[in-house]
Image (spheres, rainbow, N blue to C red):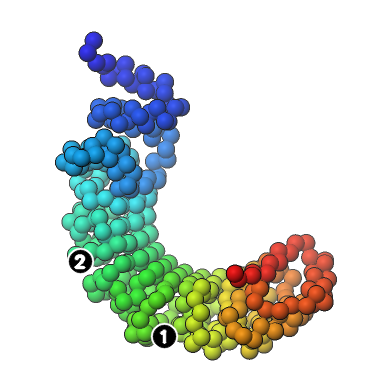
Amino acid sequence: MKKLNIHCLILIFDELRADKKSLYSCLLVNKEWCYLVIPILWKNYPTYFIMIKAKIINNITNVVFKDFSKKRNLLEQEIYKLFVSQCKGIKELEWQTSQPLPSFPGALTCFSRLYSLQVDLSHVNSNNLYEMAHICKDLGELTICGFSQDVRGLTFLINEQRNLKSITLNAKKELCQELSKVLARKGHTISNLSLVGSFGFISHSFLTSLVNLKKLKVCYCFVKYEEIEEFQEYLANSTFPELQSLEIYYNLLCLKEFAKLIEKTEGNISNISSLSFLNFNSSTEYTGIFLKAISNHCPKIKNLATHIGPEDLKYVKSLLMNCRNLISLNLDSLRENNNNIGDELLDILTKFSPRCLTNIMISGDWKYSIDSFENYFESYRERKSLRFMINFQI
């Protein structure tokens, strides 16, 4: 017998189903063994979720064909075809390969129920996105990464979605203005927006169209002044009445605009985080304005993390008196020279904190006395639980 028949191989591989390491080795022998082993490895894997990453397939093909790029590409293609043909109705996909997944046999049954899609434009070309747009029209979540000169397929994909709710922009270089326009057209369905490094890469004019936005996350650092100005302009003209969560990271130069944004909400915000790991002195004058807006317009807030300066303690007092649903509070310093506000802050926390506030973190940059701590913890003696932390910056 020159080679075992398929039935014998299946029996052998089935006996090895608990030995993942051996099965992985068998996967690399040849294409026939690969076809037989993958269904066994994936037998108990949930069909509603799959991550297809180029690096996973690259690890396999690099072992088999180190120096033969053509053969390596063929094997990579066959493995992806097998994934697509074997997986039915997946819900989540991370697309990081140049392989034309929507053109493979079984793509319709594989991707038609797709809900969450992450696209790396550095690998996925416009034609493949066109094809995917004809298959899946009910995306709820879309994450855009990488860079491509041609985003026509991406804009077509977005335009075809019936109920797109969440958008994450993590672009690396400039995207065409058409993308901003198509996001504006989806403004009535988008409720979750994450901007990660989008400054200078896309016009933020679409912000004014997001009338049903509930969650907003903005991460930006080392941006040019004119790029900040463009964002500030559209943010100031935007209104998100249903906003429930606001997260701002790395840079606090837009606190004034975010404060105005909070003032225009309907009071349903429950989570705010505005923490910077950078020192921007120009932001210090607006921390009080930001706290005041939260105090007056966020009665339902439960979690708050923000910076305060030495002139902001009056707003902390007002915040504790008005926001009686507060559970978690994180107050960080602005790294200023005036660090003698620790005792006064503890006194305010002692007298005005709501009973439900049991998770507190305060900056280690401020000076505290032993007596202030004793008084503070004495006031919390009757509470069931308290998590108190001082964050010392090194």
Q: CA distance from mark 2 to mark 1?
A: 30 Å
Task: In the displayed orientation, state which residue is furthest to the left.
Answer: 70
Left-right relation of 342 to 331: right
State the mark number for residue 158.
none
* One can see residue 96 in this view: yes
First reached walking from the N terminus: tag 2 or tag 1: 2
Residue type beneath disc 2: Gln
Q: Residue at x 41, y 85 (%)?
A: 236
| Residue 238 in the image, given as x and y percentages of width and height | 40, 82
| Residue 280 in the image, given as x and y percentages of width and height | 49, 82
Q: Residue at x 40, y 76 (%)?
A: 222
Q: Residue at x 25, y 55 (%)?
A: 123
Residue where numbered disc 1 is placed: 236
Left-right relation of 53 to 288: left
| Residue 298 in the image, given as x and y percentages of width and height | 58, 78
In the figure, residue 357 lies in which quadrant?
bottom right
How many C-alpha atoms fall within 10 Å of the one at disc 1: few (<14), some, or many (≥20)?
some
Q: Residue at x 82, y 73 (%)?
A: 374
Quarter in which the C terminus is drawn: bottom right
In the figure, residue 150 lies in which quadrant?
bottom left
Residue where numbered disc 2 is placed: 149
Task: In the displayed orientation, state which residue is furthest to the top.
Answer: 1
Left-right relation of 12 to 263: left
Quarter in which the N terminus is drawn: top left
